[in-house]
Image (spheres, rainbow, N blue to C red):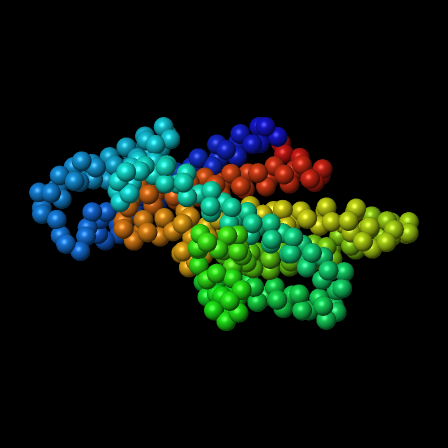
């Protein structure tokens, strides 16, 4: 297992390098620059600023210098938030994004697994069709459509929940963002759980357990649930990454001061180092999550052996 983990980590290095290179080229190819304002700076002032930040160097040299700093753990200074480094901004904003994503993922797992299991046990019934219809709806509607609808209904019409991020709202300010992020994942997990549970319930060891007189809930809890969760576990890596990166849109809609809001503002302001730092951070996070899922898959399923 240790050898497999090391090989996966080494294999992720070329992927990260490719992501960094593409992000670097795309950011610098965008029109404008980090110091372009509505009022143009004098030519000599603009030249001095670019020289101070070494933006006047050729792109290959800038890229090599950025990689050199990245190896040392230095993501560079922010061009817009000039009193902060990129690492400080990410460290301050990510805990809130992580809390939002963790709550949404927990909600998605609990509701999705329960809904999928119930649908599998009631296969072909009205309840099964209802769960699958809601799942298809959740998959089809994007979060930037769901969020305004939830705000309109629960905040504007019913006045049950705050419409945005307010310090006076307490824990209730997390409800709508968490539901918005969780709904698509609930739909995916419910469908995966249903399909996997139907397959497991038809296997020989389940028939043997039922022949011993065990009830349906006992069979599901003790024998069927664990093997049925393997496809869901495989999906967890991309799902968690999708929730974390999907919070970029949700944080902007609800005004949440998380990492997603920093990313959007950095992209609009051409803050090269902040955009690159967030992209690198997200890419490393996705690689790490997929690695953890693969390791857990081997721990849960004894048939899997990494060589």
Q: Position of residue 141 (x, y in %)?
A: 51, 65
- Name of the residue lying farthest toward the front: 168
The answer to whether one can see residue 280 in this image is no
Q: Position of residue 305 (x, y in %)?
A: 66, 35
Residue at x-position 61% and y-position 64%? 135
Tell me the quarter of the picture where residue 46 sits.
top left
Q: Position of residue 102 (x, y in %)?
A: 55, 47
For the residue pair 252 and 221, the one nearer the viewer reads as 252
For the residue pair 306 and 217, the one nearer the viewer reads as 217
Residue at x-position 56% and y-position 49%? 103
36 is higher (above) or lower (below) than 136: above
Q: Position of residue 215 (x, y in %)?
A: 86, 54
Residue at x-position 63% and y-position 34%? 306
Quadrant assignment for the N terminus: top right
The answer to whether one can see residue 98 in this image is yes
219 is higher (above) or lower (below) than 1: below
161 is higher (above) or lower (below) than 23: below
282 is higher (above) or lower (below) than 197: above
Quadrant assignment for the C terminus: top right
21 with respect to 188 (left or right):
left
For the residue pair 99 and 239, the one nearer the viewer reads as 99
Tell me the quarter of the picture where residue 188 sits.
bottom right
For the residue pair 3 and 85, the one nearer the viewer reads as 85
Number of dots carrying numbers: 0
- Name of the residue lying farthest toward the right: 212
Residue at x-position 78% and y-position 54%? 201
Tell me the quarter of the picture where residue 19 sits.
top left
């Amino acid at each position: 297992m240790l050898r497999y983990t090391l090989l996966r980590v080494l294999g992720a290095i070329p992927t990260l390098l490719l992501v960094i290179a593409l992000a670097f080229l795309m950011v610098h190819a965008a029109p404008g620059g980090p110091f372009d304002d509505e009022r143009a700076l004098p030519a000599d002032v603009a030249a001095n600023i670019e020289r101070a930040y070494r933006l006047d160097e050729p792109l290959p040299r800038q890229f090599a210098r950025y990689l050199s700093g990245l190896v040392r753990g230095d993501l560079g200074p922010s061009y817009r938030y000039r009193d902060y480094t990129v690492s400080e901004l990410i460290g301050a904003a990510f805990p809130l994004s992580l809390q939002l994503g963790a709550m949404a993922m927990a909600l998605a797992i609990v509701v999705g697994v329960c809904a999928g299991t119930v649908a599998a046990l009631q296969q072909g019934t009205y309840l099964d069709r209802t769960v699958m219809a809601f799942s298809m709806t959740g998959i089809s509607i994007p979060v930037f459509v769901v969020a305004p609808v939830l705000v309109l209904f629960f905040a504007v019409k019913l006045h049950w929940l705050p419409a945005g991020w307010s310090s006076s709202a307490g824990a209730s300010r997390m409800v709508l963002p968490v539901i918005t992020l969780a709904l698509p994942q609930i739909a995916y997990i419910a469908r995966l759980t249903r399909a996997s549970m139907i397959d497991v319930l038809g296997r020989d060891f389940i028939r043997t357990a039922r022949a011993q007189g065990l009830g349906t809930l006992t069979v599901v809890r003790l024998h069927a649930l664990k093997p049925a969760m393997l496809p869901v576990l495989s999906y967890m890596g991309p799902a968690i990454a999708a929730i974390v990166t999907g919070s970029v849109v949700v944080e902007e809609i609800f005004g949440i001061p998380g990492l997603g809001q920093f990313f959007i503002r950095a992209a609009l302001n051409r803050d090269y180092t902040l955009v690159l730092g967030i992209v690198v951070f997200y890419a490393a996070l996705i690689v790490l999550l997929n690695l953890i899922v693969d390791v857990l898959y081997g721990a849960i399923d004894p048939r899997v052996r990494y060589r």
